[in-house]
Image (cartoon, helix red, strand yellow):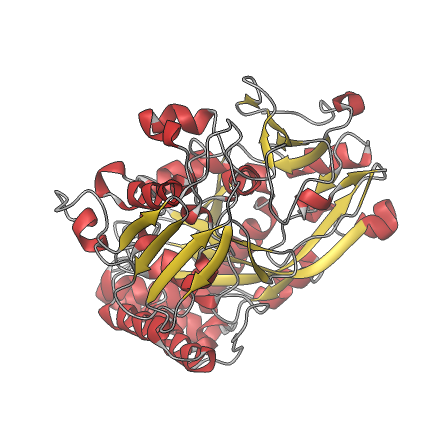
Amino acid sequence: MLPACTVTPALGDSIAVNGSEPQNPLVPSNTNENGGGRIVDRLFAGLRRIAADGSLHDEVAESIETTDQQHYRIRLESGWTFSDGSPVTAHSFVDAWNYGALITNAQLQSYTYEPIVGFEDVQADPPRAQTMSGLRVLDDLTFTVDLKVPTIDFRTRLAYAPYYPLPAAAFADMEAFGQHPIGNGPYRFAGPEAWQHDVKLDVVPNESYRGGRPARNKGLTFVFYSDIDAAYADLLAGNLDVLDTVPTSALTVVHADLGDRAVTAATAKNQWIGTQPGLPHFGGEEGRLRRHAISRAIDRQAIGDKIFRGTRAPARDYTSSVLPGFDDDLPGSEVLEFDPVQARRLWARANEIAPWSGRFEIAYNADGDHQPWVDAVANSIKNTLGIEAVGAAYPTFKQLRDQITSRTVGKAFRSGWQGDYPTMLQFLEPSFLSHSETNDFDYHNPEFDALIAAAEAAATEPESWALVARAQTVLLHDLPTIPVFDYVNSSGYSDRVRGVTFGWNGMADFENLELI
C-alpha cells in the first residue's frame, strides 16, 4: 500500500484525492463499495445524475415519460458516445441492465433490477430467459421499461451506477473490460497504465462527454491509502489535495491545521456492526437477544463525543438524518439507547438458550480509520456485559469485504451504507431484502420484504415514508445488524485547489475541483 508522502506535486495538473483499491474490476453492475464506486461514477454517465446537493437532473435521457410509475418510455439525447467513439444507444442501456440482472453473471448489484418485469426469469437457477421481458428497444434512441408494480423511486434510481450504459466492446470480456473500462462519463482512464493496483488510479477529462457535469480540472489521481493518518499527513504536506475523511486522531487539530479548508457537514452515511447467522451464538432467537444486548451496551453518545468530537451522532434508525422522510423516533428505536441494566438482562436471557463461550470480535479494515471507534465500542461492551470483546483488524477494505461476501469472516464486522441516491429505500433494500446479493447479514423476513414492496408502490412520498417507518420497526425488532453512528463528515483540502464542496453523501464534488 502507498505510504505517507509518496504522492507529490510532480503530478502536475492532476488533483490528488484519497481513495481505496476497488474490490472488483470497474463494472458498474458489480461495484457496490466506496473505493470502486467513486471511480465508476466519474467514468460513466447514466440517464440521470445527482448533483452535490442531492437534486436530480436528466443526463443522457432527453425524456423519461410515465403516467403511472410502472410503464416508462425513455428517449436518449442524440450525439452521446463512449470514450472509444462508439455511440451510446438504447441497446447500451438495455444490454447492460440485462447483463447485470442475469444470475449466471453473478453481479453484486443484480438486486437493483428486481422491479423490472422478467427479473425472476433471469434470476432463476438455471435462468428461464437470458433477458428481461420488461425491456424493449424501439429504435437507436428509444426504449421502454415495464415494471411489475408502480415503483416510487425508479426515476431516482436511474441515476445509480447499475443503470449506467455499457459499450458493445464490454460484452466480449467483461472482466478485462473492468480493468480498462470505456465509459461515457466526464472522465476516462489516463492511459493503459492508469490503474496501478493498490497504489493509485489516474483519470483525465473525457473530451466526448456532453452532460451536465464537465470536468473543470485536467485530471484526478485517486490515491489508495492503507492508513488514513498517512493520507492526512500527505494533505498537510501538500502531497494530497482533497481528503473526504479526516482521521479521528486529527479531529482536535484539523481546524487549527487547515483553517477554512476544514469542512464539516452531515452526510448520508452510517455505521453498523453486523453478524451472520453462521457465527456461533448469533443464530435464531439467541442471536437476536445477543444483538439487542450488545446494542444496549454501546454508549454511542460518549464514544461519538470523545472519539469523534461530535462528528458522529448516535444512530436512530437504519438510514440517515439527511434523507427525506427520516424519523428519529421510530417504535423500537429504544434498542439503540445505552442501557447497561437492560443489556445485562437481555444477555442473561440469551444465556438461558445457550451459555456464552468465546469472545466477541469486531472485524474492521485498518485502512479506513476504524480502530479507535471499534476499540471504544468493544470496551463499552466488555465493561457492560463482562465478556471479552475486542477489535480485529484486516489490512484493507477489500480483504475484509472479500471475507464478508464469501461468508468466511467468522466474527462480527463493521459495516454500513453510504448513499448512492437520496432515498431511504436505497439504504434499506440493498442490505435487507431477502433476494439482495448485498444482504451481507443473510436477513430474510417476508414481513419486511412486503412492507418495502408496499413502500415502493405507494402513490405519494409521505405514504411511502410511513411504510418505510413500519419496515424499520421490523428491523429494529430483528436487529440483523446493529446501527451505531450517523455520520457528520469531517473533510479537508489543500491550498492548491478551489471550488471544493462535499455532496449529500460525503463525496467530493470531483468535477468542480480546480487548481488555483
Q: Is residue 218 left or right of residue 152?
A: right
Q: Is residue 516 left or right of residue 334?
A: right
Residue 353 drawn at (x, y percent): 22, 65
Residue at figure coordinates x 58%, y 42% from the top left: 368
Residue 163 drawn at (x, y percent): 41, 49
| Vertical side of 302 occupied by 455: above or below | below
Q: Is residue 26 left or right of residue 70?
A: right
Q: Residue pushed farthest top?
A: 193
Residue at figure coordinates x 44%, y 58% from the top left: 157
Query: In the figure, residue 441 lies in which quadrant?
Result: bottom left
Residue 134 drawn at (x, y percent): 25, 56
| Vertical side of 113 occupied by 327: above or below | below
Q: Is residue 480 visible?
A: no
Viewer-proximal residue among 117 and 328: 117
Residue at figure coordinates x 33%, y 56% from the top left: 144
Q: Is residue 467 left or right of residue 279?
A: right
Query: In the figure, residue 153 lies in which quadrant?
Result: bottom left
Residue at figure coordinates x 63%, y 49% from the top left: 212
| Vertical side of 80 occupied by 476: above or below | below
| Vertical side of 149 occupied by 6: above or below | above
Query: In the figure, residue 242 lies in which quadrant?
Result: top right
Viewer-proximal residue among 291 and 214: 214
Q: Quadrant of the N terminus?
A: top right
Q: Quadrant of the C terminus?
A: top right
Viewer-proximal residue among 264 and 323: 323
Q: Is residue 194 visible?
A: yes
Residue 206 drawn at (x, y percent): 61, 33
The number of numbered discs placed on residues in the rendered structure image is 0
